[in-house]
Image (tube, grey):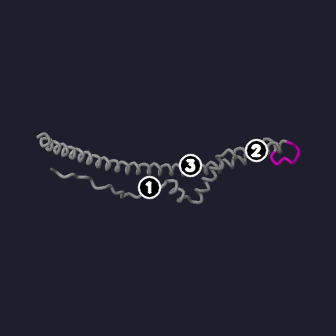
Amino acid sequence: MKGLHFPQPFRHLHPPIRNVQDIFTEQRTLGQRTSDHVAKIVGSWPFILIQSGILILWVVVNSMAVIAHWDPYPFILMNLVLSLQAAFTAPIIMMSQNRQADRDRIEAHNDYQINIKAEEEVRIILLHLDAQNEALSHLSAKILQIEQALQPRSNG
């Protein structure tokens, strides 16, 4: 009769997986934090509503003869201000989006590492289950042998 053999218990030799958001937040520079903040503000409804209100006020005040017109129709100064805002805001938002793409790549790599570790652990679990199946089969055969050995004695 051969002895039962079980695999060694699994030992986690890999470092723990860290939250990508925590890693990415720790590594942000002042410029990156600023671009994220600007993108968050500019891409919000309050910003759109406030900007729309300012533009409407600009047009109304410059269209009425109540005060001196600093930007008479066709509002060339307003167009210049909006163009400058767009010229600076677009690259800042792009910087924030590029950072988000970098974060997504790190997240994908992190997911890949987790999948590799999970696959290794599943493989080990399956090895243990195979060993247990073999042990149960062996023990079941032994029990059957013992039962058969005891049966003739109980009949006689």
User: In front: 12, or 95?
Assistant: 12
Image side of residue 1 versus residue 59, left or right: left
Q: Is residue 16 above or below residue 101?
A: below
Which numbered dot is residue 85? none
Query: What amino acid is found at the position of numbered circle 2 in the picture?
Result: Gly
Compare marks 2 and 3 and give the one earlier in the sequence. 2
CA–CA distance between discs 1 and 2?
A: 47 Å
Above or below residue 81? Residue 28 is below
* Gap between marks 3 and 1 measured at Cα: 25 Å
Report, in whole angstroms, how far the alpha carbon at label 2 lies from the one at label 3.
27 Å
In this rendering, is residue 6 above or below 75? below
Classify mark 3: residues with Cα within 10 Å, few (<14), some (14-19) or many (20+): some
SS at mark 3? Answer: helix
In the image, taking residue 71 as reference, residue 48 lies left or right, namely left
153 on left or right of 26:
left
Q: Which residue is mark 3?
A: 97
Question: Which label is found at residue 17?
Answer: 1
What crowding class fits label 2: few (fewer than 14 Cα within 10 Å), some (14-19), or many (20 or more)? few
Kindly identify which numbered label has been placed on residue 53: 2
